[in-house]
Image: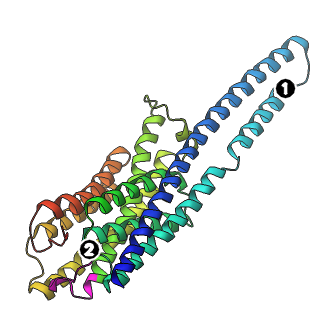
Amino acid sequence: MTETFVSYSLIAVYSAMAIYTLAFVLFAVDLARRSAESSDASAARATGLASASAQQASVMVNGSSVSGTDTLTTAGASESKIVAHSPKSLKLAMAMTVLAWVLHVGAVIFRGVAANRVPWANMFEFTLTATALIVGVFLIVQFWQDLRFLGSFITGFVLIALGVGTSSFYVDVVPLPPALQSAWLVIHVFVASLSTGFFALAASLSIVQLMQARREAGKALKLRFLDTLPAADRLETLAYRLTVVGFVMWTFTLIAGAVWAERAWGRYWGWDTKEVWTFIIWTIYAGYIHARATRGWRGSRSAWLAIVGFLAIVFNFTIVNLFFKGLHSYSGL
């Protein structure tokens, strides 16, 4: 029976990866659509200005009472019509993402049933669960703010993570080591995974913020789709809010980990490599929040800090788990 559920889990995750690929392509198509609409809007604006100039010249020569306002209004209406065009590719991309996520969650559940425990006790299981939570956070956040333009970033990252997880991190279902046989496994790791979802979304926003800031500064960045996205300062504000939520959860992760360590090993802190890197990540994000609130670190500097923080999380999960030995060596590899 265990092997059956393991097979179901693998079928579900591979199916989810195939649909995530379709969603990624559709999100990329939507970015291309945005670029095309931006070019059309710019052309319409230029045509409207040219027509207005011609009308004003006609007024001066013929003494007519007609002004260029009507032409500008028409051009503006044309531009508005272009921008308001129904983005079918975006709707289909979101539908594909939801479908892939349902299969993804199904893979997590099947793995948990097969193992008869929560499915995040090794690197493969953590990859499976954490990526599902990242996509889940992305979908839930849409009810608060339209961040669908990040779809290609999120689905692309999840595809890479699942590809590496299934090809390099996969292990069969095995019993838990004694230190993991605790209720804290459910609490500590789940909250850490959930906070990773918020940090991933904030990092994606920060990447777009850096691109948008270069465009607004007149730097050589000819990506037309940026014209249809929020301004750099708005993207920074959204990234900051998501980071604060993730930071609160990561703080709980750090505290819960210390409590769990005391239960398992009789000490709250032992300078284990994993513990140190968890604290380093907490320090990076604490510095980000503090610097932005008190030192006026805005713009590119805050964006880079958010990106560095997320890269530290990826480093902690990959390099630290694979190449550093310690009490937290639960990769299963």
Residue 55: name its quadrant. top right
Q: Is residue 31 above or below residue 264?
A: above
- Quadrant of the snapshot with the N terminus: bottom left
Q: Which residues are magenta?
A: 173-185
Q: Is residue 227 above or below residue 123?
A: above
Any part of residue 103 in sight: yes
Residue 79 pos. (x, y %) = 71, 38
Q: Residue at x 74, y 42 (%)?
A: 81
Disc assigned to residue 172: 2
- Quadrant of the snapshot with the C terminus: bottom left
Q: Say which of 325 and 104 sits in front.
A: 104
Residue 262 pos. (x, y %) = 13, 85
Q: Say which of 44 and 54 sits in front.
A: 44
- Tell me: 273 left or right of 244: left
Closest to the camera, between mark 2 and mark 1, is 2
Q: Residue at x 32, y 78 (%)?
A: 119
Q: Residue furthest top?
A: 61
- Tell me: 25 left or right of 307: right
Q: Residues within 10 Å of mark 1 (few under 14, many from 20)?
A: some
Residue 297 pos. (x, y %) = 33, 50
Q: Indicate whether residue 187 is drawn in magenta.
A: no
- In this figure, which residue is indicated by the disc labeled 1? 67
